[in-house]
Image (cartoon, rainbow, N blue to C red):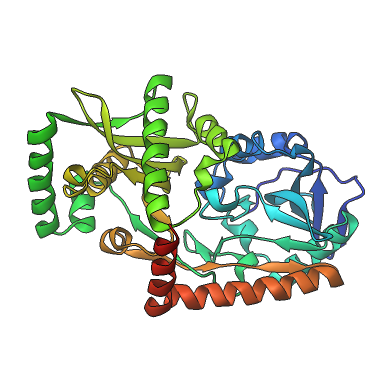
């Protein structure tokens, strides 16, 4: 069932389709009332990355805010079906429209008015997007990481799109925190973690699991995260995206306020205030979606698996607070595979609008295929990892 919120019918960037109309709205301010109306009504189909608070926190730190647009699609009666925030940029003369959030968002699903609003014919939706794109001077839509299904509903933007290099990992929670823990961690794993927690507290004193709620707690946790992540990425020979001042500013904005778009959790040595591990994620009423994690690289701390200790606490905390799902994001990792019971299949659609956009889409599809092949071949992945470490 769609939510009856009419959207503006005027504007040059509008495209008609029998029963379907797509428009490109000029920035977040033009869409804020519609967006907040959908969120207030409830029943939307979205991930935590589609909260207006999360999107606006990211957009406010972009160097080119004039390039922000919002795609709005409505039905023949003027009822709003979906919103999708976009960032217009130029790449070798090609005007691309990518989803706001980039690599900081694991899922770029649109904000659908509800499961019924997502029941669009994929080809009709693509035609409407192309016509709106032509009217707005867009060459190609780069639609990011689109889950093929969300909460049991198929995503029309993912239909027919190639698979992304990596999938995501998630788990269902609740209603009992201890039952959720038993599903996520085996009895043997829980026993080992209790021993590691004792060993860590014997060497560092009492431990505390903290949800950063004050400005001082957020600053301390983020400072520790940035320092620990920089060491880890340097050791792997990888560039550090968190060194970007805009990304740092975004994380601070997203975690601020009484109802933050991102929660930060940490394992802390109580006496010294030393942050041993951090885990942060985008949140809405029903879900925690992991965005970043790091742990103290000191061998004496790392051997006690502070990240796993924090994750165990996080599962208990999120269940107790009524969230129904927790995901650990895109990419393969041992702790994700050991903890999660759900693989979230991801597509990476690129929708050309013009001939130049078609050339871009062909190149992007080839890059995605190569990257997926490397990610799925342990030998190639291992070789690249060794080369990066040697370079580091």
Instruction: Check the image and name the residue furthest to the right.
Output: 12
Residue 338 in sight here:
yes
Q: Nearer the viewer, residue 229 or 353?
A: 229
Q: Position of residue 140 (x, y in %)?
A: 77, 63
Q: Residue at x 52, y 50 (%)?
A: 47
Q: Position of residue 42 (x, y in %)?
A: 55, 41
Above or below residue 299? Residue 353 is below
Q: Residue at x 78, y 73 (%)?
A: 359
Q: Is 177 displayed left or right of 44 in the figure?
A: left
Above or below residue 133? Residue 364 is below
Q: Position of residue 75 (x, y in %)?
A: 76, 56
Which image quadrant is residue 385 in? bottom left
Which image quadrant is residue 301 in? top left
Residue 121 in sight here:
no
Q: Is 365 displayed left or right of 169 in the figure?
A: right
Q: Residue at x 87, y 58 (%)?
A: 15
Q: Is 302 displayed left or right of 146 in the figure?
A: left
């Amino acid at each position: 069932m769609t939510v009856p919120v009419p959207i503006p019918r005027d504007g040059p960037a509008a495209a008609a389709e029998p029963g379907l109309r797509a428009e490109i709205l000029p920035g977040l301010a033009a869409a804020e009332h519609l967006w907040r109306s959908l969120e207030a009504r409830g029943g939307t189909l979205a991930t935590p990355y589609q909260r207006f608070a999360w999107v606006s926190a990211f957009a406010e730190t972009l160097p080119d805010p004039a390039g922000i647009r919002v795609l709005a699609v409505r039905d023949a009666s003027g009822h709003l079906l979906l919103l999708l925030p976009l960032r217009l940029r130029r790449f070798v003369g090609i005007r691309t429209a990518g989803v706001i959030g980039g690599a900081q968002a694991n899922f770029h699903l649109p904000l659908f008015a509800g499961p019924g609003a997502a029941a669009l014919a994929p080809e009709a939706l693509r035609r409407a997007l192309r016509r709106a794109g032509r009217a707005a001077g867009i060459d190609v839509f780069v639609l990011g990481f689109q889950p093929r299904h969300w909460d049991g509903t198929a995503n029309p933007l993912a239909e027919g799109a190639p698979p992304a290099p990596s999938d995501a990992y998630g788990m269902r929670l609740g209603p009992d925190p201890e039952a959720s823990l038993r599903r996520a961690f085996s009895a043997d794993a829980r026993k080992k973690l209790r021993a590691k927690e004792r060993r860590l507290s014997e060497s560092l004193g009492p431990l505390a699991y903290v949800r950063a709620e004050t400005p001082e707690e957020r600053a301390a946790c983020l400072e520790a995260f940035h320092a620990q992540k920089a060491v880890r990425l340097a050791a792997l020979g990888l560039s550090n995206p968190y060194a970007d001042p805009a990304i740092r500013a975004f994380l601070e904005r997203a975690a601020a306020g009484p109802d933050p778009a991102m929660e930060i959790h940490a394992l802390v040595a109580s006496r010294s205030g030393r942050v041993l591990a951090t885990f942060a994620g985008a949140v809405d009423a029903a879900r925690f979606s992991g965005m970043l994690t790091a742990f103290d690289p000191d061998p004496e701390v790392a051997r006690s698996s502070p990240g796993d200790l924090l994750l165990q606490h996080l599962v208990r905390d999120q269940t107790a607070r009524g969230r129904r799902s927790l995901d650990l994001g895109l990419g393969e990792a041992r702790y994700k595979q050991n903890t999660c019971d759900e693989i979230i299949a991801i597509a990476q659609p690129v929708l050309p609008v013009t001939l130049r956009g078609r050339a871009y889409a062909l190149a992007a599809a080839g890059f995605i295929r190569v990257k997926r092949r490397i990610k799925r071949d342990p030998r190639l992945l291992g070789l690249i990892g060794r080369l990066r470490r040697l370079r580091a």
